[in-house]
């Protein structure tokens, strides 16, 4: 493992984000996130009954108006339109054209597109210490690093609702639920509770604990895989096994097709690791499987409103790789593509429910839609399909009534009535290599009505300049969508005049996480391929854009720009008509925005402090908690930092308290599900990873720039292990505008990664990869320890 010295990358790469993995994406974010070079996602279009006019005929779905001019504007306009295929012949022809167009570009660029990608918000630097599926639901393994302006006029911040992680459901004993983005919209996680039971899949196995008895009452190991997340509804849990282990060929988001016959799938393919699995389990007694759905591809993200779950799955085509060929590989690949059938391009499923099993094509051809760009152009690469599945968790498991689009997605966000899917794209004018000059990336956004329990319905499309950080970059309020983005300004490559260059886009990571790069690198493709030259990002700037639905368009009605010039967004939080944005490169400007008038959003305040917040949590009374990293004046990270901000006066935000742990980092910086705040007692808990003996932190209260005073708090629950990687639950108490350390909870039995914490009654439950511990909420006295067996 490479050592992370705590400094930023050449383009100010945010530290501490999960890395991009082959075939697995991170949420991140958001979510919960996914992305494809120039890809996007949408669903819910309806097929036309009209006969085909040509093999590639599609039916347009109105939506989107262009704010760009010329060829870029034309591309943008097409990106905002969705079309459905009128027949399987049309779909097959279209997919083949898209694959061949993209493969020609890949061979021409001939190199590892991801290796030279410029750093964008959410990218993980080498040695950040995170491996695994990231926040899309893949189990994460946190390794240890060796080192770990005021505006005119005052504005009162509205009273923030109690955070979801600290709510008390009506009529139920006090317990904390999953810390979610929007109240009433549940998100999958590795721990769930209803106040009577605690469920966890922290080690891949479903375990059920009785809250009153503090004992494990049930266990269910899933054959052929490990669960990563779940949703809970009554006596039923929907377990998610992410799948999606697909390698890449070095091209821009093109997966390596699986070898084999072009018209068949092997039995291994049917249940292999490249399948996302949803398993419905009855937990009324001993856990038992009610049904299982396996779908080609990888799990992206999910949301639950009431008893209805929406699960997003991304699937890849299965085109045979030319093997033992002689001569031109490109020609061999074209021949292989020409032999494909519809079943090579659309995902298949296997469903076992009610004692019966069925399998087949997940979605019919006329239920598949795509952006209206030309095959192989931005938004329609032919490299993947994305399906939104809907399940009523009170009924038998089915195929999810899928709606599918021939594209990919970056970020998924849901309010109580709408689902938004977003993706990066470039408006690249021209088709020749010499004419392909990079334009700043944009984000396409598609809105779907999910107010009912049926299939999502596409209702509007729009776009904004720049790229998202994660799902927290999006927020719906009072019929408007607020979008926080960072825009990069690109300069043409040095050899743009008279030399064949190339435009590269590399994607990876979830909802929450993306990376791009810059540089000149020799190609490693076929003989005679040109050297690859990427454009150079010269600056960055962030903004909050307000969109309003007008007919089938998401139209920009307001914008507040100029945030963090030369920096990137590290955290975003919208609370009612107020927005908070953190940007960072060397210092951390916290911006406060008044969004009460959608047509005139305003930046009211700015607070500059060292370090940054990666997650922002609103409190009542005009307060805001930030979890991130402390840093030196030059931007070098020094350890975990928990901050308390007073934002009651938006024109004059202040940091009134902070707590730091040297050489520490926390999963809560990347995944808000790991953050717990219990307002009834002011208890705040985050998982904490350190190198060396897990010593005490340092508290500073009453000033944003004052010195620190050492504070230790009570002794730790578990013995120190000097100078070894250590993982604990850091427990702080917020009282009187200051933080006090209550203690650190460490699980026995050697190193175990602390993952989550939950309040049930007067118990504090902590979950690690080794087991579950129960401590007193007030004094942290140990009440139970149940190791995973």
Image (tube, rainbow, N blue to C red):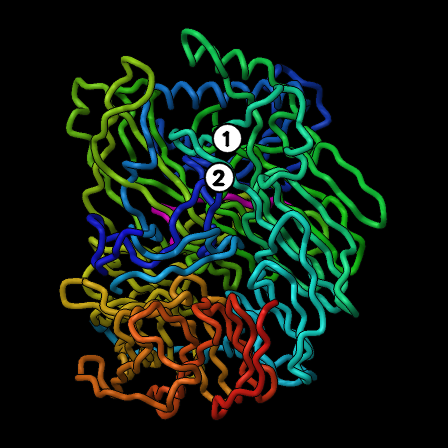
Residue 364 in picture, x, y percent from top left? 71, 31
Residue at position x 42%, y 47% from top?
Answer: 509
Residue 786 in picture, x, y percent from top left? 59, 76
- Relative placement, left or right, of 687 versus 515 is right
Determine crowd level at label 2: few under 14, some 14-19, many 20+ residues with C-alpha closer than 10 A.
many
Q: Quadrant of residue 290?
A: bottom right
Residue at position x 30%, y 13% from top?
Answer: 527
Residue at position x 22%, y 80% from top?
Answer: 704
Where 109 falls versus 645 (above or below)? above
Among numbered discs 1 and 2, the one appearing first in the sequence: 2
Q: Is residue 449 visible?
A: no
Q: Residue tagged by mark 2?
A: 40
Residue at position x 48%, y 39% from top?
Answer: 40
- Relative placement, left or right, of 109 versus 310 is left
Q: Quadrant of residue 433?
A: top left
Q: Number of labelled discs?
A: 2
- Relative placement, left or right, of 778 versus 250 is right
Span of residues in magenta: 457-469
Residue 595 in picture, x, y percent from top left? 39, 66
Q: Secondary structure at mark 1?
A: loop
Would you say residue 464 sits in the magenta stretch? yes
Where 757 falls versus 570 (above or below)? below
Q: Secondary structure at mark 2?
A: loop
Q: Nearer the viewer, residue 184 or 480?
A: 184
Screen quadrant of the C terminus: bottom right
Q: Residue tagged by mark 1?
A: 383
Residue 751 in picture, x, y percent from top left? 43, 68
């Amino acid at each position: 493992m490479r050592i992370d010295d705590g400094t930023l990358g050449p383009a100010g790469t945010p530290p501490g984000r999960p890395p991009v993995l082959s075939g697995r994406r991170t949420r991140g974010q958001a979510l919960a996130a996914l992305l494809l070079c120039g890809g996007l996602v949408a669903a819910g279009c309806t097929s036309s009954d009209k006969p085909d006019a040509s093999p590639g005929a599609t039916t347009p779905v109105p939506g989107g108006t262009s704010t760009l001019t010329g060829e870029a504007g034309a591309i943008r306009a097409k990106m905002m339109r969705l079309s459905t295929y009128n027949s399987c012949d049309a779909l097959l022809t279209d997919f083949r054209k898209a694959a061949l167009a993209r493969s020609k570009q890949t061979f021409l660029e001939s190199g590892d597109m991801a290796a030279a990608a410029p750093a964008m918000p959410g990218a993980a630097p080498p040695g950040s210490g995170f491996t695994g599926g990231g926040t899309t639901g893949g189990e994460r393994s946190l390794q240890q690093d060796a080192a770990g302006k005021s505006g005119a006029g005052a504005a009162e911040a509205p009273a923030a609702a109690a955070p979801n992680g600290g709510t008390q459901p009506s009529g139920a004993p006090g317990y904390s639920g999953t810390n979610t983005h929007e109240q009433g919209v549940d998100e999958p996680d590795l721990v769930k509770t209803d106040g009577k039971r605690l469920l966890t899949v922290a080690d891949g196995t479903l375990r059920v604990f009785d809250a009153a008895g503090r004992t494990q009452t049930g266990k269910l190991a899933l054959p052929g895989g490990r669960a990563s997340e779940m949703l809970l509804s009554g006596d039923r849990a929907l377990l998610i096994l992410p799948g999606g282990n697909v390698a890449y060929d070095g091209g821009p988001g093109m997966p390596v097709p699986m070898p084999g016959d072009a018209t068949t799938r092997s039995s291994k393919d049917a249940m292999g690791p490249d399948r996302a699995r949803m398993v419905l389990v009855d937990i009324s007694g001993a856990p038992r499987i009610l049904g299982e759905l396996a779908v080609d591809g990888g799990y992206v993200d999910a949301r639950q409103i009431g008893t209805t779950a929406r699960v997003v799955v991304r699937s890849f085509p299965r085109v045979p790789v030319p093997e033992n060929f002689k001569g031109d590989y490109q020609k061999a690949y074209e021949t292989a593509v020409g032999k494909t059938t519809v079943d090579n391009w659309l995902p298949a499923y296997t469903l076992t429910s009610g004692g019966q099993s069925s399998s087949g094509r997940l979605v019919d051809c006329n239920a598949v839609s795509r952006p209206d760009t030309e095959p192989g152009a931005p938004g329609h690469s032919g490299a993947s399909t994305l399906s939104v599945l809907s399940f009523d968790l009170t009924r038998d498991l089915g195929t999810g009534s899928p709606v599918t689009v021939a594209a990919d997605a970056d970020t998924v966000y849901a309010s109580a009535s709408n689902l938004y899917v977003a993706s990066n794209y470039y408006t690249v004018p021209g088709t020749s290599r010499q004419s392909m000059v990079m334009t700043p990336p944009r984000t396409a956004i598609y809105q779907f009505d999910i107010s009912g329990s049926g299939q999502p319905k596409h209702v509007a499309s729009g776009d904004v300049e720049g790229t998202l950080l994660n799902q927290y970059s999006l927020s719906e309020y009072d019929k408007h969508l607020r979008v926080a983005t960072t825009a990069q300004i690109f300069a043409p490559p040095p050899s743009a005049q008279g030399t064949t260059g190339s435009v590269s886009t590399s994607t990876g990571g979830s909802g929450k996480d993306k990376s791009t790069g810059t540089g000149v690198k020799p190609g490693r493709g076929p003989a005679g391929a040109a050297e690859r030259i990427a454009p150079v990002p010269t600056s960055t700037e962030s903004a909050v854009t307000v969109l309003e639905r007008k007919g089938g368009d998401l139209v920009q009605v307001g914008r507040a720009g100029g945030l963090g010039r030369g920096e990137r967004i590290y955290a975003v939080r919208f609370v009612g008509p107020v927005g908070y944005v953190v940007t960072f490169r060397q210092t951390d400007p916290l911006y406060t925005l008044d969004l009460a008038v959608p047509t005139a959003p305003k930046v009211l305040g700015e607070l500059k402090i060292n370090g940054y917040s990666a997650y922002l949590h609103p409190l009542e009374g005009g307060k805001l908690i930030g979890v991130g990293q402390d840093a030196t004046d030059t931007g070098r990270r020094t350890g975990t930092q928990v901050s308390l901000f007073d934002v009651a006066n938006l024109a004059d935000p202040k940091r009134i308290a902070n707590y730091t742990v040297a050489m520490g980092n926390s999963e809560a910086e990347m995944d808000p599900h790991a953050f717990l705040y219990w307002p009834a007692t002011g208890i705040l808990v985050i998982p904490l990873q350190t190198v060396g003996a897990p010593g005490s932190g340092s508290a500073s209260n009453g000033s944003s720039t004052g010195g620190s005073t050492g504070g230790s708090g009570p002794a730790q629950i578990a013995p120190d292990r000097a100078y070894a990687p250590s993982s604990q639950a850091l427990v702080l108490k917020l009282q009187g505008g200051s933080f006090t350390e209550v203690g650190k909870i460490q699980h026995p039995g050697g190193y175990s990664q602390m993952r989550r914490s939950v309040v049930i009654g007067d118990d504090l439950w902590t979950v690690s990869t080794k087991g579950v511990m129960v401590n007193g909420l007030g004094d942290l006295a140990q009440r139970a320890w149940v190791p995973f067996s």
